[in-house]
Every structure is written in structure tokens, then in C-alpha cells.
């Protein structure tokens, strides 16, 4: 469960994430979370990656967020054919909260890019509502699908005494992508045991991107603190599964 605790001059954002294993037959992109890890990481069957981002009004990701997200894939994925990103605004949800079924419905109504030929695809949805489970900021739910909850993200970033929005959004995107890439031990087998037994699918290293409750410390955005990265154990898992 995510906890967002705000102090006068310092915000510490602790968030895990939520994962939903939704499996539908007949489409290679609508499979169990983690099953596309090798396809995304390696160049064995897919030499290029295309990322499709759909966002609701008021929640377009900053150019720096998109650049950080692209750099994350370039750092860990073997895609000699390149990595490209497309973005498009979609209609507002008109709701205060969204269920997983509603999120799936929105994705299916808007997604246009899928895994085919030599291209693997990832879909990112940024919505204007909260999740029905309180304090969830990001959700990875299929093997190539993830969702960010912009309302909660914006309420806890970018203001005085809050973490920078670029850093928080980039961190959430990378963390949820880590699950799509099979971390930890959900599609990318562990080379060394490092799964957090109490918080499954997360790393037991509290400084790793994949730690269940990442702590992002940024006093009002004054300091240029980098987005957390996967630790060496997580990197070894990605490399062993076809990544860089």
C-alpha cells in the first residue's frame, strides 16, 4: 500500500505499487504480467519497441518525463531497431475513481499499437482519477500495460515542500515498467535471491528502484537528485533475460 506523507519542507513519498494479473486469450499483449519480459528486453524476436502513451486532459507528461522513460528502456533493452514514443490526449473519465475493469475498458477503446512483426509494444495510460484502492499511484496489470493515477500524483508533487513532479512521475513509470520487465522473479528469474518475501515482486534492497516503498527525498526540487535505478541484482536479472 502506498503512503504519502508530507512535511513542511520535505516530502517523503513512499509507494509500492499494485499488480493485476489479467489474462485474456487471443492477443499477445493481453497476457499475464511478466510474460513479455524477454520479448521486451532482448532482440531475439522483436528488434524495436514502440511505446504508446494516452493521457487525460491536464495530465500530459512533461517532455523530461518522456525522455527519462525512453532512456530507461534504452539502458536495459536490446532494441537495435530503435525505441519510439507516441502520445495522444483522450477524453476525461469524469469519475473520481476507476476500477481495474474500467481501466481495461479505457485502454481497449484507445490503444492502437500492439506487438506484431518485429515490434513489441507497451501501452501507458495516465488517468484523471484515483484508483478504487486508496493511495495507489501506479498499476501494472498486463504484460505490456500500465496505468498512472494522475490526480493523486499531481496532488503530491510539484508544490512547495513537495517532490518534483518530473522525478515522481519518472520514478513511478520506471518502477511499474520494472514489473513488466519481470522484476522481481515474475518473468525475469533471479540470478541471486533478492525478492522481498513480505512484499512479493519487490527487491529487498531499500535503495533499489524495485523496493516496495521507495523513498524519494527532494526538498522542494532544490537539489538535482536522480531517479532511483535498479540495483545490481535487478540488473543481473534483466541481463540474464536478454537485456543489456
Image (spheres, rainbow, N blue to C red):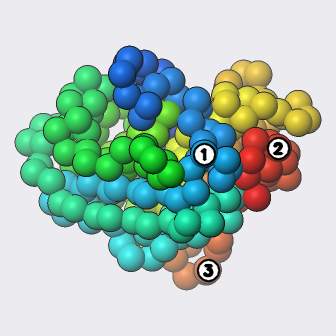
Q: CA distance from mark 2 to mark 3?
A: 32 Å
Q: Residue at x 84, y 47 (%)?
A: 236
Q: Which mark is residue 45?
A: 1
Q: x%, y% of residue 153?
A: 37, 53
Mark 1 vs mark 3: give the one in front: 1
Q: Residue at x 31, y 33 (%)?
A: 131
Specify whether 154 is left or right of 55. Answer: right
Q: In the structure shown, which secondary structural element does the residue marked by tag 2 occupy?
A: helix
Q: CA distance from mark 1 to mark 3?
A: 38 Å
Return the disc, 2 or 3, that comes first in the chain's sequence.
Answer: 3
The quarter of the rendered structure image containing the C terminus is bottom right
Return the disc, 1 or 3, that comes first in the chain's sequence.
Answer: 1
How packed mark 1 is, by other alpha carbons closer than 10 Å (few <14, some 14-19, many 20 or more), is some
How packed mark 3 is, by other alpha carbons closer than 10 Å (few <14, some 14-19, many 20 or more), is few
Q: x%, y% of residue 31?
A: 46, 25
Q: Residue at x 55, y 82 (%)?
A: 222
Name, please, the residue furthest toward the right.
192
Q: In the structure shown, which secondary structural element does the residue marked by tag 3 occupy?
A: loop
Q: Which mark is residue 134?
A: none
Name, please, the residue furthest toward the front.
117
Mark 2 vs mark 3: give the one in front: 2
Return the disc, 1 or 2, that comes first in the chain's sequence.
Answer: 1
Q: Which residue is mark 2?
A: 240
Q: Which residue is mark 3?
A: 224
Amino acid at each position: 500500500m502506498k503512503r504519502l506523507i508530507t512535511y513542511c519542507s520535505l516530502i517523503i513519498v513512499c509507494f509500492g505499487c499494485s499488480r493485476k494479473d489479467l489474462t485474456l486469450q487471443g492477443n499477445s499483449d493481453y497476457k499475464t504480467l511478466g510474460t513479455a519480459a524477454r520479448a521486451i528486453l532482448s532482440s531475439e524476436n522483436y528488434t524495436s519497441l514502440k511505446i504508446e502513451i494516452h493521457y487525460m486532459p491536464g495530465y500530459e507528461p512533461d517532455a523530461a518525463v518522456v525522455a527519462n522513460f525512453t532512456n530507461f528502456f534504452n539502458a536495459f533493452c536490446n532494441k537495435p531497431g530503435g525505441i519510439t514514443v507516441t502520445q495522444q490526449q483522450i477524453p476525461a473519465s469524469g469519475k473520481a475513481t476507476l476500477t481495474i475493469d474500467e481501466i481495461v475498458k479505457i485502454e481497449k477503446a484507445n490503444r492502437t499499437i500492439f506487438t506484431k512483426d518485429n515490434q513489441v509494444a507497451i501501452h501507458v495510460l495516465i488517468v484523471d482519477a484515483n484508483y478504487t484502492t486508496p493511495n495507489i499511484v501506479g498499476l501494472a496489470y498486463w504484460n505490456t500495460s500500465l496505468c498512472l493515477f494522475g490526480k493523486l500524483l499531481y496532488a503530491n508533487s510539484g508544490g512547495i515542500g513537495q517532490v518534483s513532479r518530473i522525478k515522481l512521475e519518472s520514478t513511478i513509470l520506471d518502477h511499474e515498467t520494472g514489473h513488466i520487465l519481470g522484476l522481481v522473479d515474475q518473468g525475469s528469474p533471479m540470478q541471486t535471491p533478492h525478492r522481498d518475501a513480505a512484499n512479493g515482486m519487490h527487491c529487498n534492497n531499500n535503495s533499489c528502484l524495485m523496493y516496495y516503498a521507495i523513498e524519494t527525498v527532494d526538498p522542494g526540487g532544490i537539489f538535482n537528485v536522480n531517479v532511483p535505478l535498479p540495483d545490481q541484482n535487478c540488473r543481473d536479472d534483466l541481463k540474464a533475460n536478454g537485456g543489456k
